Image: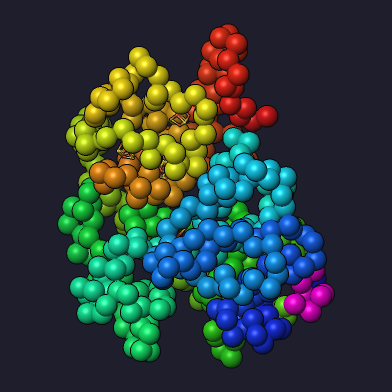
Amino acid sequence: MAAKGDLLYAWTTDDALLEKAETGGAVSALLRYALESGMVDGVFAVRKGADVYDAVPTLITDPAEIAGAAGSLHCGTLLLPKQMRRCLLAVEPDMKIAAVLKGCDVKAMYEMAKRNQVNLDNVIMIGLNCGGTIRPETARTVVRDKLGLDPDDVVKEEIDKGKFIVVTRDGEHKGISIDELEEGAENLLGDEGLGRRSNCRRCKIKIPRQADLACGNWGVIGDKAGKATFVEVCSEKGANLLNGAENAGAVQTEAPPEKGIAIRGKVENAMLKLGDKWRERYFSALGEGKERLRTIMEETSRCIKCYSCIENCPICYCKDCSTKRDYLVTPGQVPPPFMFHLIRFAHISDSCVNCGQCEELCPVEISNSVFMHALQVDLEELFGFHPGEDMTPPVLALVEEKTERKRLEATGSDQIFDIFG
Ligand code: SF4
Ligand code: SF4
Ligand code: SF4
Ligand code: SF4
């Protein structure tokens, strides 16, 4: 029987599923078992939309549809938990769900749970190892300008062994080294060249051990290479799912060889070192002290106050957002006063999970996630608070929310945002 802390190779026993799924189909088999056994009412994941650059959030309640959502989409850059809250939990708050999540998704889940936006008791988190994702428009540019292919001819893409690889409808394979794409970056604030998203370059959550199971292909070697998934059991909930699926004959498992475990560790360490290198580069581009503040002021002076960074941030849920107060923003005034951005830094910078949504969805390409992430890393060093790792409450939000609650209670407002229950 698998238990928390175990490392396993796992694969599906269903040949039809094996054909459609990647790396042995263990994740698909586990999801299908979770649905069939009634452990969950639905599976929340992404599926391919119009093309390989289009990731669409999807709720699956029919086990027969699981195979259709199989596979990774490295050009799909959605933050799934916020979509899940918006589309699903707002209408079905008690639904039991298995969610397939990248590291930043898992971190967002914890920060949302602290803010009563999701109940983790109702969610089984299947984490996926993640080396990074590429914006859809960047991926199209790479395919056209670097690989000399028509982006619309691409039917499959992957990031493997440091390369971005595509396959066309004619079966042509072409790839390019991610390092080569990213080394071309000259101005890290605003125009960072091709390659992975800026937050992915700085990311250091490659194996999401905060999830119930952490799954991926790193360290799968020998006769199981490409035919099994490396699964790390991270919680009792994860162990129950894996054991149930194995007892029901949905998956088979075996212990990985020592060499496989060592290779997985090496890949993870190399990615963590790369994350450190990019943090150093991005944060030094911001400068220190007053210089950093001036840089952020200059960059945010392009802001058109569209609120996209707030609406898509997994930390921002207040019904009565301070940035919308009439003493702060005049209708129609752009850019808003710098205080607009300072308020957000004050409220959430300790909890930023570096998901990149505030930057990617900013219509004027402001490097919002770099600013917030730099602050978060400084605050983490100062206060020792690690966002997205567990249910420990964040320091800044506690102070702010208590003050805010008092203010709202004093005015008899029905807009009280119930943080921490
Ligand atoms: Fe993956 Fe990290 Fe990028 Fe999230 S931030 S997509 S976990 S590399
Ligand atoms: Fe994600 Fe930006 Fe919010 Fe940080 S501030 S959690 S990068 S959206
Ligand atoms: Fe985000 Fe602060 Fe607005 Fe709340 S008040 S939504 S934490 S910016
Ligand atoms: Fe300003 Fe960009 Fe945020 Fe919109 S997304 S409010 S333009 S910083």
State which quarter of the image contains the C terminus.
top right
Residue at the location (62% across, 78% down)? Answer: 25
Q: Residue furthest right?
A: 247
Per the rendered image, the range of residues in magenta is 242-250
Residue 389 spot, x, y in % from top left: 57, 47
Q: Which quarter of the figure has residue 244? A: bottom right
Query: Main structural element of the magenta stretch: helix, strand or loop?
Result: helix
- Would residue 246 be counted in the magenta stretch? yes
User: Would you place residue 414 above or below residue 177 in this image?
Assistant: above
Residue at the location (33% across, 36% down)? Answer: 306
Is 287 situated left or right of 331 in this image? left
Q: Which quarter of the figure has residue 62? A: bottom right
Residue 65 in view here: yes
Residue 360 spot, x, y in % from top left: 34, 50
User: Would you place residue 63 above or below residue 40 in this image?
Assistant: below
**What is the tally of numbered marks visible in this picture?**
0
**Front residue of this view, candidates 185 and 317:** 317
- Would residue 110 be counted in the magenta stretch? no
**Front residue of this view, candidates 412 and 190:** 412
Q: Residue furthest left?
A: 186
State which quarter of the image contains the N terminus.
bottom right
